Image (cartoon, rainbow, N blue to C red):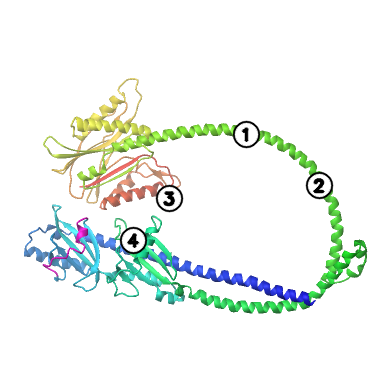
Amino acid sequence: MRSLSFQMVALCVAMVLLGGLPAFYFAYNETRRSIESNVRETLLRETSVTMAAIDRFLYERQKDLFSLTQDPLLRSLSAGQGSAQIALLQTRLKELSAAYPLYKTLSYFDVQRTCIADSYKENIGKKHTFSKFWPQLQQSDFAIEVSRSEFLKIPVIHFARKIYDTNKKHAGVLVAQVAMSELYELFNHIITSFGAQEEELRKNLEITLVDADGFILFSNQNKFIALTKRYPDIKLIKKLIEESNAGSANRFLNAEKEIYVIDQQKGYLDYTGNGWIIIAKASKDIIFKPASMLSDRYARIALIVCSIGVVIAIVVGRYFAQPIVSLHQAAEEMAQGEWNEIISDDSMFRRRDEIGELARSFRHMSYQLDKKIKEQKELNLQLRLKYEEVQQKTEEIQSQNEKIAQQKDEIEKALSEIKQKNKNITASINYAQRIQSAMLPEKEAIRRCFEQVFIFYKPKDIVSGDFYWFRQTVNGQGEPIAVMAVVDCTGHGVPGALMSVIGNNLLHQIVVMEGILDPAQIIRKMDVGVIKTLKQDTASSNRQDGMDISIITYNHQHRQLVIAGAHQSAYIVRQDTLHEIKGDKFSVGGIINTKTSRTVHNHYWQCLPGDMLYLCTDGYTDQFGNADGGAHPVKLGKKFFRQLLKDIYQADLNRQEAILAETYEMWRGSEEQTDDITIIGIRF
């Protein structure tokens, strides 16, 4: 009795300890991991949001400077401006400063870095030091630099942009100063992201913004340290950035005593950033202080639970051990004699408690066990017969499997041959694509002719039935002429690519070799060339292959644009009005239909600055999609396309190309691309 009671007490204590200690260990560690994960995710999210806000802030200032430098008065100044012009410029800078109160000062410098005018009249006549942002302006039109303003006596961000006069000649530089404190409010997102329970963490969290060289631009712990020293752990931070996975801007470092969260500038639209880094650092002692307090509470609770377990074990030992001992003695008596004799003694089975019920259940179990053994022997005999039957079926299945395996080998061999042929065909098409790409004009050659141009070229397959053609030449009067064509050949893929080779060769023959520069005449010559090349003029021919084309010639000296098209329109947007220059209603090539007029007309335009020209095939407008919410896919259509061109024509050309691509993908959704796509945009 005493031994059993002691064992039960020991068992209860052991269960409490073995169950409580691991629970305490895991609870403590899970609390630490949860706290660390919460702090890490919060800092990663908020530093990313803050850096994105900084990038957008700098991008918006870049766009402000672009707008300011387009001011007619600033662009009208010449190298030898007089006092009257300077007075007008001084007045204009004050007006712009009032319109843009974010900028502390606006200054106009000539190309020798001498201040000509200033919104505060403080630095007029002074030559600016070359160590600032001027070296950056030698490489680009825009520069950003952070330094301490000699006039304002505070850290400022200098935004500088070149000014070109009406003849596109570099006339000067506009410099705007923004107080660095304008960025400070952006950092409150990180600090205030923690709730009231993390008040001590909020107070001790260190947020620092550094530039690419490691100089501190902002610190929430010491706002007067900006631009005075480098970040002390900058080598560790840069090493972490270099060792991080490519393409990852957020970094997390779990140091011995602190955790670091680093985020680097990702850029915003066409602003690529200056390499600034935001660093959030927190002490582990502060982070895990709630976990330490929780561990003390867990220890006190474990002591109370252990004491309660001992009391329960003593009560259980005294109250329930004696019936168990009696049952043990009865079991020993049953083991010493014959089973039937023990069973015939009913003194053990007349008890009315759980022990008596257990004894009666034990006797019933012995009877049932003997019955089940006899039934099991019968089942075993039946199982043996079933096994022999299954064995025979298995042999038949194995024979069938051998035949199936042989057929599988034959199928795999045939499949391998098909894959190899497909690989060879794909390799040939890929090689053809390289040849076709080599035929297309270099984009740099086009940009040397037209300063503002974009080319959105998206073949449906590896090779394309669309192509574009360009040549810079001179006319009979020695005036520079640019010739550009956008061509949509019949079909796409390999058939369309073969037609594009014919079209490319005909354009080269007609424009370069024969010197024909009239767009309508070029199309007529191409029509004759395609019909002759494909022998479509014979009575037995049934070839309908042809091309839709739009061709322009542009006289740079007179700014005259001549447009002609065959079954393909061009678009000009001038002052929010879109003009569609429709092509004549026939395609180049194909079997000649006497009922169809094959005349071509030229359309003449006198280009104005800001005019936007679009040359395109019908692949964009013919794309099926359901972005309009309809039940069935529908074409994007010319009406939608024309409205889209009107909406975007004033945007930067890189942005126009991006909008066209994004709108197309949104419309297409999960639908397959319908046709090859080519869109070329030129701003005059």
Residue 11 is drawn in which quadrant?
Answer: bottom right
Q: Amino acid at mark 1?
A: Ile
Q: Amino acid at mark 4?
A: Gln
Residue 259 is drawn in which quadrant?
Answer: bottom left
Instruction: Give the number of the disc on residue 297.
Output: none
Instruction: Give the number of the disc on residue 404.
Output: 1
Q: Amino acid at mark 3?
A: Gly
Crowding at mark 4 (Cα within 10 Å: few <14, some 14-19, many 20+): some
In x, y percent, where is residue 138?
19, 56
Give the magenta part as a residue range: 123-139
> Can you identify the residue that label 3 sits on?
629
* Distance of label 4 from label 3 (alpha carbons): 37 Å
> Can you identify the residue that label 2 sits on?
380
Q: Is residue 32 magenta?
A: no
In x, y percent, where is residue 492?
37, 35
Taking the image as shown, residue 287 lies to the left or right of residue 164, namely right
Q: Is residue 129 magenta?
A: yes
> Can you identify the residue that label 4 sits on?
265
Which mark's residue is nearer the viewer, 4 or 3?
4
Taking the image as shown, residue 330 lies to the left or right of residue 566, namely right
- The answer, for residue 15, to whether it is visible in the render is yes
